[in-house]
Image: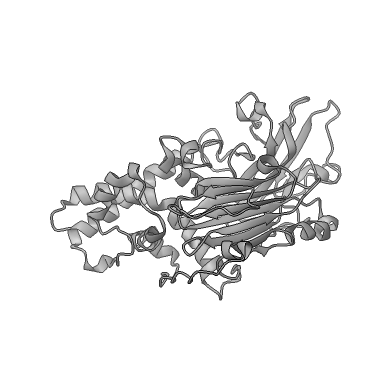
Amino acid sequence: MTDLTPAEAKAIAGEAWLYAFAPVALYNTMYAQAIDAASPSYVGGFNAFRHYDRLATPDDTDIVTPNNDTPYSWAWLDLRAEPMVLSLPAVPERYYVNQWFDLYTHNFAYTGVRTTGRAAGTYMFVGPDWQGETPAGITKVFRAETWIIGTLTRTGVDGADDIPAMKAVQAQYRLQPLSAFAGTVAPAPAAMPAWPVWDEARAKGLGFIAYLNALLPFMPVVPSEAGMFERFAKIGIGAGLAFDETALNPALRDAMLAGISDAAAAFQAKAAKETSSAAMFGSRAELGADYIYQRSCGAALGILANTKEEAFYASQQTEPDGTVLNGAHNWTMRFVPGQWPPVNEFWSITMYTLPQRFLVPNAINRYSIGDRTPGLKADPDGGLTLYLQAESPGADKESNWLPTPKGPFFFAARFYGPKAETLDGRWTLPKLVKGD
């Protein structure tokens, strides 16, 4: 870094911080689930499913903005030694989706009802430059950009009484190495690195570089980013490199911290104005030219959400004057007659605390509301009014009540199997109306 000026170091650090935002946020989840055996979120390491067989509660903090519609199944796959094979059962009626993401948080593949149908199938996941033969019996091959990938699998459940039947479907999602599927000799396992312990405070500062460097051996540089990584190398970013911010020249260190601070402020100001997730989740190609911002924004608002064709997400983060929504006031959301959410599957609105973005403890243990909520009442004219507030709106309205915290809140509306009018903007989520 001896040839860098403070201005250059500041600019590169800000650029690198935004680039790394989503992968480093994902590392937090991966570390807890696949690396730290002492974590309550641990799924058992790599190449195995862990199924959750209950609806989410405020105690679930694995991931921000968890949904309360489809219990999760998690798996992290290490594809370095050999590909992994996923076998799926025939599922005649129930909704399910296997969302597959890489270390960038790009949704690079989907299996499930919408994309591969309800018939049984067998799918192979391979790393960036795998060149082997595809054995008989494989329905489709998916190639990832990174050597480690994951799935956030969602299986629909229609209330607590439906959980045993939902568990029976989860139990039929099967992962196995290619050698086990094909009956061949297994290759030697790939050595695991010494993963850095997750530290939230460290990740928010220059320590993000250490986490990015730990991930980069599993993320081959794509040609379009080669020039970017030449710049990043000037501040110590590179696959597997050690990074010690205490060894930096003080002037460069201060400049890099200023670059991170400026980049974070600019990013947060822009992201706070977003009201739709339509452009934030998808493959690298689907995210478009501004893919780094889009995936970063997605990671900030709710990491690992679905691509819009699978599930469309919408929210309202502030009042018209920019004030954060607050449960000190009572709010209503009204769908006018004929304008209920247009979906092929189902829809819900889930409430979260701020700044944590976890589910909200409340007296009726209701964390989301939607078309599957028992007792939901239409208005006399055929519309639908929802009550978002901290205290009960009254016994006659509690069927339509989604409790908020007493302070700042955030909500996420989810539309599973969204229809065309949702995706093309002909239908939009109604704005909240502020009461007393």
Where's residue 370, x and y in %?
A: 75, 42
Q: Is residue 296 above or below residue 341?
A: below
Where's residue 2, x and y in %?
A: 14, 58
What residue is rendered at 25% in x and 55% in y? 233
Q: How is the image coloured?
A: one colour
Q: How many marks?
A: 0
Q: Is residue 106 or residue 362 the one in the foreground?
A: 106
Whether residue 405 sits left or right of residue 283 in the image: it is: right
Q: Is residue 210 or residue 354 the one in the foreground?
A: 210
Task: Specify whether residue 329 is in view.
Answer: yes
Where's residue 299, x and y in %?
A: 50, 49
What residue is rendered at 61% in x and 67% in y? 43
Q: Is residue 201 above or below residue 360?
A: below
Q: Is residue 124 or residue 216 the one in the foreground?
A: 124
What residue is rendered at 57% in x and 48% in y? 141
Give the quarter of the image for residue 56: bottom right
Give the quarter of the image for residue 40: bottom right
Q: Is residue 300 or residue 103 the one in the foreground?
A: 103
